[in-house]
Image (spheres, rainbow, N blue to C red):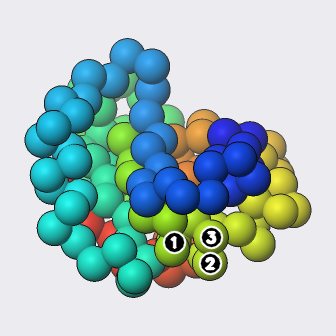
Amino acid sequence: ESMRWVLTHEPTIQWYAFCDDDTYIRGPALTAMLSRFDPSAPLAVSGGRNLRGFAPGMWPWLAKEGCDSAKSCIFAFPWMQPAFFNAVALRTLFKPAIDVDGLTAECDHFHLTHDVGLGVLNWMVQTPTISL
């Protein structure tokens, strides 16, 4: 719902941030990093390369699949958190999914958390992505 709100109420927004409420962000550093990217081309920037808090044995069902570390599980668990999308990506690639509640429906249907669902949706719409 926050993406829909931003699209409706913040027409001049340059970047959309998706992160948990316990995520610490250094605003000036983030602004400096994001300002280096071309604002006219769709782009996502994600901290999703590693599974936050992942520890061997944490999820036994993943271990049965041969997934015993963040590195070996990245394709089984497409985490995308925190994530930053520029306005072009949000308005062109994500808007059709947002308009039909696509992220919510995807998470409900496949029993995904919003962090994983966002990663899958990002992959589905093929947003050019930089993983940090």
Residue 57 appears in the rendering = yes
Residue at label 1? Answer: 89
Residue 71 appears in the rendering = no
CA distance for labels 1 and 2: 5 Å
Residue type highlighted by circle 1:
Ala
**Could you tell me residue 30's position as x and y percent?**
20, 44
CB atoms of marks 2 and 3 within 8 Å: yes
CB atoms of marks 1 and 2 within 8 Å: yes
Q: Secondary structure at mark 3?
A: helix
CB atoms of marks 3 and 1 within 8 Å: yes
Q: Secondary structure at mark 1?
A: helix
Residue type highlighted by circle 2:
Thr
129 with respect to 37 (left or right)? right
**Could you tell me residue 5's position as x and y percent?**
72, 44
CA distance for labels 3 and 1: 6 Å
116 with respect to 4 (left or right)? left
* Mark 1 neighbour density, 10 Å: few (under 14) some (14–19) many (20 or more): many
64 with respect to 97 (left or right)? left
Q: Secondary structure at mark 2?
A: helix
- Of 110 and 89, which appears nearest the observer? 89
Residue 97, above or below 38: above
**Could you tell me residue 110's position as x and y percent?**
73, 50
- Of 105 and 92, which appears nearest the observer? 92
CA distance for labels 2 and 3: 4 Å
* Mark 3 neighbour density, 10 Å: few (under 14) some (14–19) many (20 or more): some
The furthest residue to the top: 22
Q: Residue at x 42, y 55 (%)?
A: 15
Residue type highlighted by circle 3:
Arg
Which label belongs to residue 92? 2
The furthest residue to the right: 100
Residue at label 3? Answer: 91
Which label belongs to residue 128? none
